[in-house]
């Protein structure tokens, strides 16, 4: 009764006092007070005594973690006095690790990774649910922003989640999560039923669970689009996906040798959403190898001038090979790629007013094998960047004709 009375009078007045209003617009409120009022077990609250300047929890109960933190910080600084300054400047992790929440399988500890080396997502039994917003956000950020090249699904023997899925008991809410492992069991039931030793059967289910979660990652659209992109621009597909299992009984980490190629082949027709075949925005007729360095100079001319005069201006003879590449009725720009190392002759490429720096880089990649991201294109000493362009809806950089003329076309040909 006292409590009710408190809520009706003093409590509500105090509660609303903690809000600030600008006109009718809500600005904010004191979280400490609200948390304290409704979640505290402090007996003083029953008497209506309100404290707003202290935490409801006693930090002294957690003294161990603060002591540990002090020791750890000291140790870190003794190894490198600038360690926190460096880490505060940003992260460039090598791996995305999707592991189990189990307290015995901290990925960084097991793999000996330092701060900043792994981007980590953990849940019960390291499951990749295709509609899990938390996991999807992690994958999106890791793949598209951090440009992580390796994703590791890390399972472990003795996994409580996997064990639970092997029993016919309802675990309430968790049952709906481990249902995903029951699905793995169903997919591989024939193989699992042949294993008589229950411990080995459990271990095999752990491995198969990791395998199936890896396949889920292959089917993820963010992963697929990045793989299609890097296949074109770097001649390799990133991110790569790996399955690993940690043995809690002896501390060993094992790489699962999964034949992803044949497994993906079977799933390709169902799950492929990225365009791996036609991800190439430019067509190059002649893909003869030419030794182009990573740093190249480009000159761009309009093809209104005769082919002969254009090639002559670079003091080199016209060759038959040029004619194959430059089709006057199709291309309206001629790009001469001149490696700055010297001896290699300039290489002409046919282009259009709408050809982008990005497309140009892809063409150079095809001709020379120079990695897309490492190419530096110069025009008259000025570094051309992908930002010299706007982005269209497909993420393909485009430069308008005017921008191209002003930025790149030499004035003597710009008539
Ligand atoms: Zn586990």
Image (tube, rainbow, N blue to C red):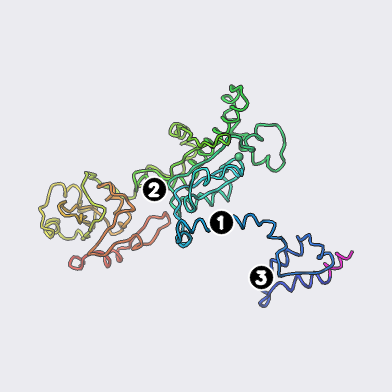
Q: Earlier in the sequence, mark 1 or mark 3?
A: 3
Q: Is residue 164 left or right of residue 361?
A: right
Q: Which element type, helix, strand or loop, lies under badge 3?
A: strand
Question: What segment is highlighted magenta in the picture?
Answer: 1-8
Q: CA distance from mark 2 to mark 1?
A: 45 Å
Q: Which mark is residue 372?
A: none
Q: Which element type, helix, strand or loop, lies under badge 1?
A: helix
Quadrant assignment for the N terminus? bottom right
Q: Nearer the viewer, mark 2 or mark 1?
A: 1
User: What is the x, y in percent for residue 55?
Assistant: 70, 64
What residue is shown at x 25% (from left), y 56% (from top)? 295
Q: Which mark is residue 229?
A: 2
- What crowding class fits label 3: few (fewer than 14 Cα within 10 Å), some (14-19), or many (20 or more)? few
Q: Which mark is residue 71?
A: 1
Q: Is residue 6 magenta?
A: yes
Q: Is residue 34 magenta?
A: no
Q: CA distance from mark 1 to mark 3?
A: 37 Å
In the rendered image, which residue does mark 3 sit on? Answer: 28
């Amino acid at each position: 009764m006292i409590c009710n009375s408190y809520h009706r009078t003093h409590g509500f007045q105090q509660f609303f006092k903690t809000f600030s209003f600008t006109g009718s617009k809500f600005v904010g409120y004191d979280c400490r007070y609200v948390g304290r009022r409704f979640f505290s077990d402090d007996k003083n609250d029953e008497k209506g005594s309100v404290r707003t300047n202290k935490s409801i929890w006693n930090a002294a109960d957690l003294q161990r973690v603060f002591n540990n933190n002090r020791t750890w910080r000291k140790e870190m600084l003794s190894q490198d006095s600038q360690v926190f300054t460096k880490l505060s400047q940003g992260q460039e992790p090598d791996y995305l690790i999707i592991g189990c929440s189990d307290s015995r399988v901290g990925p960084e500890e097991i793999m000996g990774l330092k701060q900043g080396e792994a981007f980590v997502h953990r849940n019960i039994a390291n499951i990749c649910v295709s509609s899990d917003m938390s996991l999807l956000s992690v994958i999106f950020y890791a793949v598209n922003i951090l440009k992580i090249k390796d994703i590791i699904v890390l399972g472990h023997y003795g996994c409580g989640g996997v064990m639970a899925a092997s029993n016919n008991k309802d675990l309430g809410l968790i049952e709906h999560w481990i249902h995903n492992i029951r699905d793995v069991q169903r997919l591989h039931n024939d193989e699992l039923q042949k294993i008589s030793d229950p411990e080995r059967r459990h271990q095999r289910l752990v491995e198969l669970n990791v395998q199936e979660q890896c396949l889920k990652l292959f089917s993820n659209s963010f992963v697929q689009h990045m793989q299609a992109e890097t296949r074109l621009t770097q001649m390799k597909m990133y991110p790569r996906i790996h399955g690993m299992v940690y043995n809690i009984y002896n501390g060993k980490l094992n790489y699962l040798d999964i034949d992803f190629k044949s497994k993906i082949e079977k799933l390709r027709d169902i799950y492929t959403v990225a365009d791996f075949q036609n991800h190439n925005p430019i067509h190059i007729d002649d893909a003869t190898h030419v030794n182009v360095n990573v740093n190249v100079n480009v000159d761009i001319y309009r093809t209104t001038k005769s082919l002969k005069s254009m090639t002559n201006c670079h003091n080199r003879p016209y060759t038959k090979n040029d004619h194959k590449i430059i089709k006057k009725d199709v291309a309206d720009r001629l790009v001469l790629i001149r490696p700055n190392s010297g001896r290699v002759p300039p290489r002409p490429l046919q282009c259009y007013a709408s050809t982008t720096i990005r497309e140009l880089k892809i063409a150079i990649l095809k001709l020379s094998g120079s990695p897309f991201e490492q190419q530096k294109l110069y025009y008259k000493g000025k570094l051309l960047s992908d930002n010299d362009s706007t982005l269209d809806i497909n993420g393909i950089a485009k430069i308008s004709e005017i921008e191209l003329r002003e930025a790149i076309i030499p004035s003597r040909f710009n008539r």
